[in-house]
Image (cartoon, rainbow, N blue to C red):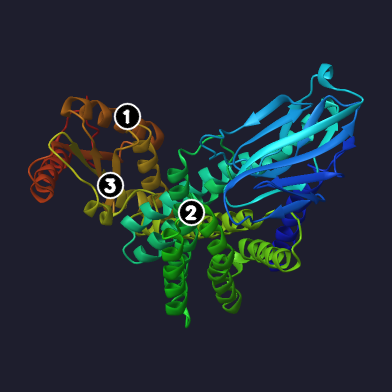
Amino acid sequence: MRVRKILIACLLFLILFWSLSYLPRPTGYVLDKNWSLTIDNKTIEIELPYYQFPKKSGLAEFKTSFNKPEGDTLVIPKISCYAFKVYINDFLISQAGDFDSPTANIWNYAQVISIDDKILKEKNDLRIETYLLDDVGMHIPPFIDLKKNVIGRISVFNFINNDIHLIMLGISISIAFIMITISIFNKEHRIMYLCLGLSTILVSLYSFDCLYRLYSGDINTFLFIRKILFSSCYGSGIFLIWGIEKYTNRTLKLRRLIFLSVVLAIILVMTSEDFITLRSRINILNVITVISPIYTIVLFFKHKMAPFIFPMSFVTLTLIYTVLSVILKGNTPYMFPYGIIVYSVGLGFTIILEFTNIYNEKIKIYEKSVTDQLTGAYNRNILEDIHMNIDDTLILIDVDNLKYYNDTYGHSHGDALLSGVVTTIKNHIKENDFIIRLGGDEFLIVLKNTEEAVAKKIIASIRQEFKEKIQSKKVDISFGILRYQADFESSYSQVDKIMYKMKADKKYSKAEDNLPDFNL
């Protein structure tokens, strides 16, 4: 089972990696040569893919030239900036974001731009004006192809890069609120569910940094949002470790050091005065986002917690991949957010499933404790959990001459008769009513929100069906009917007297119109 979960995690990782690498691949006329980049009036020749962290925010301009292509669509698979304008031969053909308030989040989205054939020449100039805040680059070369050749796969690519995050965001927040709700009612594991729920919410907030949007407020607002998003990612580690400690009943040796590191990271992030400072600090502090999952992964593997193998394996793969990408400076798909979200969702889902199983087991134990094994009716234990009121009506039933029936037909038939009584009663009462075996051949029916007149009709139908099934004049049921009084003890005492009065009336009655003659 563990090997299969690890293999599934590896397969999911490979599928995701292939999708993010293959779908945006350049086809048709690839614009990967003769590029120049101008930043702060300084122009340099560059090769794509290209990425850098400038020393200050401002305008950046990418330029290249190309011969007249056969395609009608320009695709810019992945560009790092916060607003851009695309010109071909000085004609503006596309724009994303606002240069007056460059707060678009477009780095994780492939742009598909239609080209009017009228503006194309034999030799064409392509110019992409961008506004950078903390980074600038093109991770995949732009290309020109027919729209029908690219629209399908680029749409799938954008779905994986953007919509999947929205879906996972919804799932993770739902799981988080379920765990927080469980923490309210589960005193034994309250801190564990609360911490894991808060950790999941904070990680979910971080995923907003991966979502495509054209506007994020003014510069100061956007800077504050980014600070909150990264601080949420770091802070989730504290609640994650705390929750896992409560789950495993183990205290991590390095927890204080990790907590202090996270607090320091949050302080450094929140005190960043601009995007450049924030980016430089994040590049160093990102190790904090790796420590907490790695530490909990080690703990899970150490204690052989099989249910968590899948999310642990997947996030381990993304962590190793991310670290290698940073060390080797590889221009590869950014998969760390997927690992964190799958880890949080998988962890939360597994713990909720485990809670559900425990809860269901408790329900089974409880149902067994309040159920009469012979007849399937409730037993006396259920009386503690039934909330009766003056709108309810009680019917107390006793089977007449059960001893005679047992002596004549055997105790197995007598047991079947008692089960038949319960089956007959269930055929005539509502789902929210109760049938309780008080002991021997005595049963109590609690009719919720039922008038006595209705109760009389119900017991008449029950008695009629019972007599038809038994087909013996020597076996009948006696009963008492009473509207519930102030408390159960007094109500039971009164309805018991009414029932025994009926038994006495039967014993001494000679009439044959309503009551059978039990005289031998």
Residue at 47 percent of width and 46 percent of height: 174
Image marks 1 and 2: residues in contact by CB distance under 8 Å: no
> Which quadrant holds residue 284?
bottom right
Residue at mark 3: 401
Residue at 36 percent of width and 31 percent of height: 465
Q: CA distance from mark 1 to mark 2?
A: 86 Å
Task: Give the amino acid at mark 2.
Answer: Asp
Find the residue positioned furthest to the bottom. Answer: 253
Task: Give the amino acid at mark 1.
Answer: Gln
Residue closer to the observer: 127 or 286: 127
Relative to 16, is 343 on the left or the right? left
Q: Looking at the image, is mark 1 or mark 3 earlier in the sequence?
A: 3
Residue at mark 1: 464
Residue at mark 2: 274
Q: Looking at the image, is mark 1 or mark 2 earlier in the sequence?
A: 2
Q: Looking at the image, is mark 3 or mark 2 earlier in the sequence?
A: 2
